[in-house]
Image (spheres, rainbow, N blue to C red):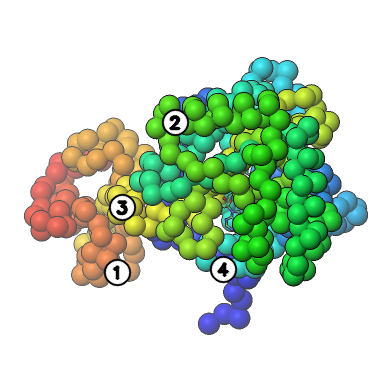
């Protein structure tokens, strides 16, 4: 046993999980593309100030969870804890707002947060996300929520609750903030974190798991929304209702990132334990401007790939992953190895439509041939690898320009003409 283990909070992805992840990636990409989102790949690390500025100095992510380091020239960098800040940076840097009036982009990749590891919570995890720039209207918020829902339903994840809230805007949020300060200043026994939050970021109190029982009568944002925000939020709800998308308004939903304005949402699944948010997002109308761009209202979301796959454990998604069709190449006589090797390569390249001639499907996996293995052990290996067919190069058949193809399940074999 090696003394080396994957670092705490990270995990290796292999076997069924790797296949499922590939399928989730494929499904998400096709949904994103259908809605006209284009991919942006950004670096895994950025200037630390980008995240501090966009996510907010008084958030858990910035205060406690970022992997910050200095490079050899003393630049302060951080591994990305999320994708939105990087996308906004790239959007401004490449003047993408000049190319199209509305910009729709998606991304996928690893994110890093130094959190306490537990089921569904990692220090390196995968997100797939979408950001929609330049549409201030509530239909964009709903398009993003429905996009998330569409991906989940393609994995048969339908047993979810969509929590939504509005965090208001620069006009009405300060009123709510002050109401929270007034309310909580007279609340006894706040936990240490909440006492700190009360000074720096009172909205985050509503997210506290320890003190949540004391918040039953806390002020709600919906009672402080200005007319514009109220109107925006009611259109979001009317649109969700019009397409039959169920949701619940959740006064306590404040999110852990400071850039949000107006609509925020989380999709929660009871199938994944305490870390039940499988995707989340919201509107951020001021972030592009705050990072040096134009005033471009935007909205987006990200799903946590590992959590989504946990939610898909019992939906039949794993059972229905595309089945592999493995063709094993066996040699009965080592003199034929070179011929078999060439054949395997031609089969993979589908030269002269070999698959068609041999009645094999388009998507196949080719394994073999192997040197220094008895025919018996080659067949044993073919069984172990769950080969559907084994192509056998045998001396007697080959002298007659023939190869044998064995159906491993039915135990039948068919001769085929072999012309170079
Ligand atoms: P977030 O809520 O921090 O939002 O993360 C989005 C999703 O990533 C979560 O719902 C969860 O599924 C997954 N996730 C977060 N932390 C972890 C972790 N430690 N381990 C495993 N999965 C995790 C954002 O990141 C925003 N950038 C979303 C967004 C995009 N808002 C607007 N546009």
Question: Circle 3 is placed at which residue position?
Answer: 316
What's the distance in space between the residues labelled 4 and 2, CA to CA?
Answer: 35 Å
Q: Position of residue 131 (x, y in %)?
A: 62, 34
Q: Does the CB distance between marks 3 and 2 fall below 8 Å?
A: no
Total labels: the figure holds 4
Q: Nearer the viewer, residue 335 or 403?
A: 403
- The residue under the point 52% across, 66% down is 119
Q: Residue 189's x, y, as percent?
A: 74, 70
C-alpha span from label 3 to label 4: 25 Å
Q: Which residue is mark 1?
A: 373
Residue for point 65% across, 67% down: 210
Q: Which of pointers 4 and 2 indicates the residue nearer the eye? A: 2
x and y, in percent, of residue 98 in the image: 73, 18
Q: Give the foreground label among 4 and 1.
A: 4
* Residue 241 numbered tag: 2
The local secondary structure at tag 2 comes to helix
On the question of residue 68 being in view, the answer is: no
- Marks 4 and 1 sit apart, C-alpha to C-alpha, by 45 Å
Mark 4 neighbour class, 10 Å CA radius: few under 14, some 14 to 19, many 20 or more: few
User: Quick one: label 1 or label 3, which is nearer the N terminus?
Assistant: 3
Q: Of marks 4 and 1, which one's residue comes earlier in the chain?
A: 4
């Amino acid at each position: 046993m090696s003394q080396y283990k994957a670092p705490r909070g990270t995990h290796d992805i292999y076997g069924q999980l790797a296949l499922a992840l590939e399928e989730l990636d494929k499904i998400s990409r096709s949904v994103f593309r259908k809605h006209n989102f284009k991919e942006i790949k950004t670096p895994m690390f950025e200037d630390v100030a980008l995240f501090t500025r966009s996510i907010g100095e008084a958030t858990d992510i910035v205060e406690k969870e970022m992997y910050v380091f200095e490079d050899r020239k003393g630049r302060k960098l951080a591994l990305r804890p999320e994708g939105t800040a990087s996308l906004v940076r790239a959007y401004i840097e490449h003047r993408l707002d000049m190319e199209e009036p509305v910009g729709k982009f998606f991304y996928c990749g690893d994110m890093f947060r130094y959190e306490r590891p537990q089921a569904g919570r990692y220090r390196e995890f995968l997100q797939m996300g979408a950001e929609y720039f330049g549409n201030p209207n509530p239909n964009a918020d709903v398009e993003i929520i429905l996009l998330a829902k569409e991906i989940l339903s393609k994995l048969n994840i339908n047993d979810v609750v969509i929590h939504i809230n509005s965090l208001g805007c620069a006009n009405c949020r300060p009123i709510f903030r002050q109401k929270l300060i007034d309310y909580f200043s007279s609340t006894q026994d706040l936990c240490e974190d909440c006492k700190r939050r009360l000074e720096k970021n009172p909205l985050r109190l509503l997210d506290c798991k320890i003190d949540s029982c004391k918040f039953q009568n806390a002020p709600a944002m919906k009672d402080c929304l200005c007319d514009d925000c109220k109107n925006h939020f009611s259109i979001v709800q009317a649109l969700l209702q019009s397409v039959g998308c169920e949701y619940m308004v959740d006064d306590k939903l404040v999110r852990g990132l400071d850039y949000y304005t107006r609509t925020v949402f989380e999709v929660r699944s009871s199938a994944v334990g305490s870390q039940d948010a499988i995707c989340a997002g919201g509107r951020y109308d001021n972030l592009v401007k705050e990072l040096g761009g134009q005033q471009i209202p935007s909205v987006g979301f990200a799903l946590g790939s590992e959590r989504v796959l946990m939610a898909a454990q019992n939906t039949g998604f794993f059972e229905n992953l595309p089945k592999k069709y493995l063709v094993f190449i066996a040699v009965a006589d080592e003199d034929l190895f070179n011929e078999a090797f060439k054949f395997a390569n031609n089969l993979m390249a589908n030269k002269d439509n070999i698959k068609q001639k041999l009645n094999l499907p388009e998507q196949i996996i080719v394994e073999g041939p192997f040197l220094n293995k008895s025919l018996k052990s080659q067949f044993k290996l073919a069984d172990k690898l769950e080969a559907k067919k084994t192509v056998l190069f045998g001396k007697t058949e080959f002298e007659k320009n023939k190869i044998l193809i064995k159906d491993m399940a039915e135990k039948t074999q068919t001769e085929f003409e072999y012309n170079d």
